[in-house]
Image (cartoon, coloured by chain):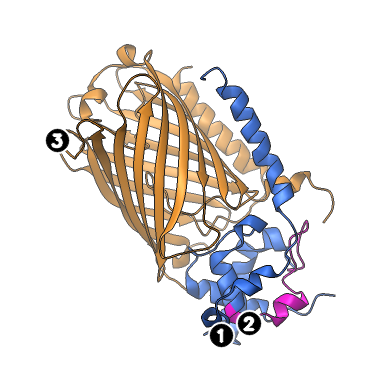
Amino acid sequence: MIRNIPKLAVTILALAISIPAVVLAEADGKWLHRVPDEDHRRTNPVAHQPQAEAAGKVMFAENCAKCHGNDANGLHNRPSLRSERIRNATDGDLAWMLKNGNPYKGMPPWSSLPEQQRWQIIAYLRTLPPQK
Amino acid sequence: MRCQSFAQLSLLALGTILGLTAPQQASAQEKPYFVTYSADLEEPGNLEIALKGLTASPKNANAFVSPTIEIEYGATAWWTTEVYAQGQATENDSTVFTGFRWENRFKPLPREYWINPVLYVEYERVSQADKSILEVTGHDSIARFQVNNGQTHGIIEKSIEGKLILSSNFKGWNVSENFIAEKNISNEPWEFGYAIATARPLVLAASSHKCWLCLQNFDAGAELYGGLGTRYSFGLKQTSQYAGPTVDFRTPAGVTYSFSPQFGLNDNSIGTLWRFKISYEVQQLRDLFRRSK
């Protein structure tokens, strides 16, 4: 068994590298149907506050831009955050998505980021123009 | 390999990576824990390189320093894989490479709950001279630090280890509990241990400008861990137990510094452990190999 461990390690590492390419599918919006009504109806306590939007911009650059792009238009098949779907989603929907993520579609949960910071990011997302 | 070279190699590797990689962001999800795992996995595509160190001066034994290099990769949003290489240098004794570990963490549930589980599986091949104390299991005690490296370095232990990681986030606080079960592949009984920790950022709302010394870049907390004996003698008797405060500081340049003094809670434990960690996250490593936007 021990002799096989290097082979097993190589196989698992190869999987580790290749699986993301398969799993990283484009967002299909199905997650919106999983948002409970209570979460869907939540409102952003810092909406339209310039201070919160500025903080959200900093947080976005630090945590989100690496996957969704500095312009939030999406990178490497990862979804745009300026799309019609995101613009039509409620603040509560986005808060639910940030908290829970969509792990089997490549989006990690951000539940350990304080809730205030997640609302700041959402406030910033609302300042972005529609996707061209 | 001599451990002085190992420590130098660790620093050189870390320095090279820090020097070659453009400034990026540190992970805001990082926790200041040294032994306890939270449910946070490495973000998919990110590679974290860390140098974790421990130094102590046990009673009736020589002082030592034990560096561990960690390379952690977020394979998917539900799977993180990590390799460790570790060594130690003991005063008036020698410096030795003590072995490696390979761990995997899996998040089985697709959404967040009040308590979030993560499953951990590890294979390790470590000599008995190891002093990294990455966890405490069985009847681990101060006595093994009083034996010189010549007697223990040649004895290699191959083990598998499982952990159940439970973690909750509430109003900025993270509370994590780990239950550890370890089995030497040779004919030895299952050994058990635990680790509990909590931490919180110093402020919950982010600053509206990018800054180094903003309180949001600091986390503070506490950690408690120790052995729980073996299958045949379960409990806290004849085990080592440690507790202490812990802090970390995430710089906007992408490096995170963590520090923790930890104190032995019984006679089987070392009086004080000084732990430190320097980590750096290479963001979206796999994007470097992609052409299209």
Residue linked to disc 3: B267
Q: Which chain is blue?
A: A
In the image, is residue A91 part of the stretch drawn in magenta? yes
Marker disc for residue A90: 2
Under circle 3, the secondary element is loop
Inter-mark Cα distance, 1 to 3: 56 Å
Subunit of label 2: A
Upstream in the sequence, badge 1 or badge 2? Answer: 1
Mark nearest the camera among 1 and 3 is: 1
Q: Which chain is orange?
A: B
Q: Position of residue B37 (x, y in %)?
A: 42, 48
Q: Position of residue B267 (x, y in %)?
A: 14, 35
Residue linked to disc 1: A41
Q: Position of residue A69 (x, y in %)?
A: 73, 63
Is A122 rendered above or below residue B272? below
Magenta-drawn segment: A72-92
